[in-house]
Amino acid sequence: MMKLKELLKGIEILESTADPELEITGICCDSRSVREGDLFVAVRGYESDGHRFIQAAAEKGAACVLCESVPACGVPYVRIADTRRAQAVAAAEFYGHPADQMKLVGVTGTNGKTTTTHLIKQMIEQVTGGKVGLIGTIHNMIGSQILPTERTTPDAISLQKLFREMADAGCAYAVMEVSSHALALDRVYGVTFEVGVFTNLTRDHLDFHKTMDEYCRAKALLFAQSRKGVVNLDDAYAQQIIASAGCPVYTYSANTDTADLAARNVRLDHEGVRFCVLTIGRLEKTSLPIPGRFSVYNGLAAIAVAVQLGMDLGTAAQALEKCSGVCGRAEIVPTGRDFSVIIDYAHTPDALENILSTLDDFAKGRVVALVGCGGDRDKTKRPMMGKIAAEMADFVIVTSDNPRTEAPMDIINDILPGLKDSKTPYIVIENRKEAIFWAVQHARPGDIILLAGKGHETYQVIGHEKRHFDEREIVAEALQSR
């Protein structure tokens, strides 16, 4: 509980009808979750405007509303210029600035965020022996405790609540994925990161950012909030990130020794990657049991963060060797048969190219790629996904992903032009479950079937509804019926 005047400390107030001494019992930006005595923050969102729900919040017992325009109902209000940023400031105040009690690591980039954050968490826990918090796409974690998650980066209020829980549980560190949406929409406004990490930038989210330059500018915002930066020097956008960074930057690379940390003597096989990490005056051997060249980059990023946090390079290299993979990232599904099934979250052209390149390194038979694209998202990448699948796989199954409010066949028809000039055989099966069954039933000895796009997700979004859809379960069903 906190007085309204204390909660809004540091926020410029334009107009108010609320008593500054009013006791606030909670803070909320979702009218459905409002409780008696809450401060309801009306945020103009990307898809909806919270001002439309002020009356609903008042009816549920909101004591006061923080808003940008005067409410039509008679609820006490405080009007300010920017509720999006104000909710971040107020939430930090309400929860006692928990982020200041931990060292935070933020990881941004199109691909590799989830794996890299998990590696960093595991490494810190190995070396310090303490709990580390994690916030990301698959789930949130406090040490070994797993908490569900709705989006890659939570809204500012949920984020501060999570930080409070982590700090109270004894976490001295927290590692989080920081999406471009979160940066552009001020979900991490006011948060200071000990280390900010940039993994890469490839085509994605252009339905939101419109251009790659805007997408890059959103990612670069992380480094205005970081004390130190870690940047993948091999990425085409690295120099733009470095030039705009407001902090010292430490670079890593698998291609050049000019980086502060470089990978050398890289060895790839179906069991993972082995390489040496090189810095001035030091060379250490390490490995990671996750196949693919992208694992070298994820491992380098994690080691670079560890070094920036004060860890010895040799200690960090040894810690990486003990790390494990992440659900839905190059995840091997046991089949007990003479062919393999791999689930991967690849839903961008670059990610699909990476995983198919990895599979090609050790495939004994065909690489069969099952590919779709999400609805209500960047349409321009759809033919690119089809083209990459056709160029790098031996057989392609074009199917549905999360169609959302689009017709699945409309999405598929956007993918197909990418395959039209290819000699690679393909089949269209709109229903994803039927497509997986077909792939398993037609598998040949030595084949690798790649189920691309959904990864860790155990649901399919059709319309506005989430329906249970776990590809591991579907593969098991298909194997039984084979």
Image (cartoon, rainbow, N blue to C red):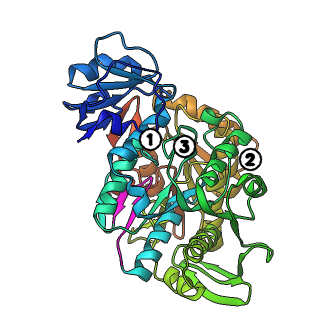
Q: Residue at x 51, y 25 (%)?
A: 81
Question: In the image, which disc is placed on residue 88?
Answer: 1
Q: CA distance from mark 1 to mark 2?
A: 50 Å
Question: Which residue type carries mark 2?
Answer: Ser
Q: CA distance from mark 2 to mark 3?
A: 18 Å
Question: Which residue type carries mark 3?
Answer: Gly
Q: Nearer the viewer, mark 3 or mark 1?
A: 1
Q: Residue at x 52, y 55 (%)?
A: 192
Q: Residue at x 62, y 55 (%)?
A: 351
Q: Is residue 104 above or below residue 122?
A: above
Is 133 magenta? The answer is yes
- Say whether disc 3 or disc 1 marks the residue closer to the N-terminus: 1
Magenta segment boundaries in residue numbering: 130-142
**Foreground residue, 322 or 158?**
158
Residue 377: x percent and y percent?
56, 35
Residue that mark 3 sits on: 372
Marks 3 & 1, CB-CB < 8 Å contact: no
Residue that mark 2 sits on: 422
Q: CA distance from mark 3 to mark 1?
A: 36 Å
Residue 296: x percent and y percent?
63, 73
Give the position of the C terminus as an image quadrant.
bottom left
Q: Residue at x 26, y 31 (%)?
A: 21
Q: Residues within 10 Å of mark 1 (few under 14, many from 20)?
A: many
Determine if residue 324 is in view: yes
- Judged from the image, the secondary structure of the residue bearing numbered disc 3 is loop
Q: Is residue 381 above or below residue 358?
A: above
Is 140 magenta? The answer is yes
- Say whether disc 2 or disc 3 marks the residue closer to the N-terminus: 3
- Judged from the image, the secondary structure of the residue bearing numbered disc 1 is helix
